Amino acid sequence: MKKIMLTLLAFSVWSLSAVAEDGFYGGVKYSKLKVDYSTIDGLDLNDVYEQDFNSLDYHIGYNMGNWFFEGAYVDAGDESKNLVSVTSGIYTLSIDSKVEIDGFRFGTGYNHQINDNFSIRPFVNMYELDTTATISGTITNGTDALTASAQQSGSDTMIDGGVGLQYSVNEKFNIGASYSTTIDEIEDTDKVETTSITASYKF
């Protein structure tokens, strides 16, 4: 899949499609992220942390010729996973994990115009992401609760490449869908796949 993405990007340089109108645009992208974690010292982190995230991407872009450039704030929220839940008498022990992801995206790509309405858009993105992973344990007896937790935070860079299909509803409004996969992953992950739908408006 990565070779296909890179081939599309290389092809875009040589494409002779009609030039898009220069100018700024703004948009919102809703994405489903699928994270494939690494195995560390025999522990598969997919068994520890949630793999599926819902992300919102608020971006500003600029069309220059057939190329486009984007900057965005990305918020994947937080997703939790219950690891252990044991009840004995009035006591319940629950162990959970939670991962929080947000940060910024900087991307570029190429508008390959198919006809007046449709275009294919190969692209590459670089992300600067802040991640926080928390493991917590809680003991409850129905009225009181005792909680202990351990947390690890950090920042990392991720690069992905993909291809999108865009439909121009009119001269100002566009909708689209895209798929991408990582070229350079964040720490403790083997792959992140992103499936998105986008709406954008030209200023």
Image (cartoon, grey):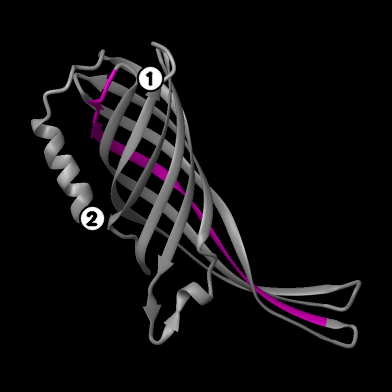
Query: Does the stretch in magenta take in 162?
Result: no
At label 2, the amino acid type is Lys
User: Residue 178, relative to residue 191: is it above or below?
Assistant: above
Picture coordinates of residue 176, whole percent (x, y): 41, 31
Answer with left or right where residue 13 lies relative to residue 202.
left
Picture coordinates of residue 48, whole percent (x, y): 53, 74
Front residue of 194 and 140: 194
Quarter assignment of residue 72: top left
Q: Which residue is mark 2?
A: 2
Separation of residues labelled 2 and 1 (CA atoms): 28 Å
Q: Residue, x 17% and y 41% (percent of image)?
A: 9
Q: Residue, x 26% and y 27% (percent of image)?
A: 68
Residue lying furthest front in this view? Answer: 115
Q: Magenta part mainly helix, strand or loop?
A: strand
Contact flag, marks 2 and 1 (Cβ < 8 Å): no
Number of dots carrying numbers? 2
**Extent of the magenta region:** 92-115
Picture coordinates of residue 51, whole percent (x, y): 50, 63
User: Residue 201, relative to residue 68: is it above or below?
Assistant: above
Quarter assignment of residue 115: top left
Q: Which residue is mark 1?
A: 25
Residue lying furthest left in this view? Answer: 14
Quarter of the image with the C terminus is top left
Picture coordinates of residue 165, whole percent (x, y): 35, 34
Answer with left or right where residue 32 lies relative to residue 21.
right
Quarter of the image with the N terminus is bottom left
Secondary-structure class at tag 2:
helix
- Earlier along the polypeptide chain: callout 2 or callout 1? 2
Quarter assignment of residue 99: bottom right
